Amino acid sequence: MRVLAMILALTTTGCATLGSATQTVRVVTEPPGAQVAVLDHGGRQELGAAPVEYRKGYEAYRCSPLAWLLPAATVAVSGGAGFWLAYGTTARNDKLDSAWAAGSLFGAVGLALGIALTAECRMKDGVVPGHEDAQVVVEAFKDGFQSTSAPVQVPGLVKDLKLVLAPLAAPPVAADVVK
């Protein structure tokens, strides 16, 4: 039984591991050349004049490309263990019949376990552990224009972000009065 537990532990470890990733968002502004800053949990970071790139690193679960082997491994291990246990504990004339039945039963349980573990691994793929997606705010500002901002999820699907700054209202011009 100890060997079975060891083999199962070896086949399941490394299915979903933490891996580092980086998201890059290219920020452009209208009008061009506006100053861009990012606000996140670490504070405010000035990026410079647009167009600029914002890179944010994060850790996420990565499912091993070999995760699909897990159901086959669990069937082989549990089916083999069931066959071996039944063969060693059954009377002489029924050894093979009993061993095949037990091996099939243990193999079916192993298959269900392997499929469940692989499905969990696939569902975790790309998920950031410990918190929901981190939201950062990208803001742009330029003299003569209203500043603007937009939230960006990390990790997320946004690769390009365009911020449009509206011109400030011009002060009223004194009209010449003609008499």
Image: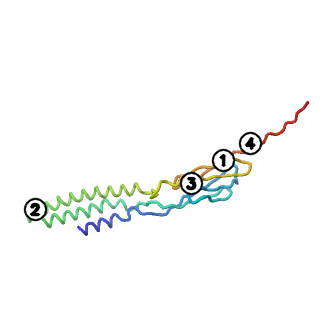
The answer for how far apart the CA atoms under marks 4 and 2 are is: 94 Å
**Residue drawn at (69%, 45%), measured in percent from left and top?**
166
- Give the image location of residue 34, x and y in percent: 69, 53
Badge 3 marks a residue whose secondary structure is strand
| Residue tagged 2 | 94
Mark 1–mark 3 CB contact (< 8 Å): no
Q: Quadrant of residue 84?
A: bottom left
- Foreground of the two, 140 or 130: 130
Compared to residue 47, the image places residue 6 above or below, namely below
Which quarter of the picture shows residue 175?
Answer: top right
Work out whether 88 lies above or below 150. Answer: below
Disc 4 from disc 3: Cα separation: 29 Å
Name the N-terminal-most of marks 4 and 3.
Answer: 3
**Label 3, residues with CA under 10 Å away: few <14, some 14-19, many ≥20:** some
* Tag nearer the camera, 1 or 4: 4
Residue drawn at point x = 24 percent, y = 59 percent: 107
- Give the Cα distance between marks 1 and 4: 15 Å
Disc 2 is placed on an element classified as helix
Q: Position of residue 89 (x, y in %)?
A: 13, 65
Relative side of 61 to 101, left or right: right
Q: Earlier in the sequence, mark 3 or mark 2?
A: 2
Question: Mark 3 or mark 1, which is nearer the start of the sequence?
Answer: 3
User: Which amino acid type is shown beneath numbered disc 4?
Assistant: Ala
Q: Amino acid at mark 2?
A: Asp
Q: CA distance from mark 1 to mark 3?
A: 18 Å
Label 1–label 4 contact, CB within 8 A: no
Q: Identify the residue under disc 1.
A: 164
Identify the disc placed on residue 169: 4
Q: Label 1 to label 2, Cα distance in Å?
A: 80 Å
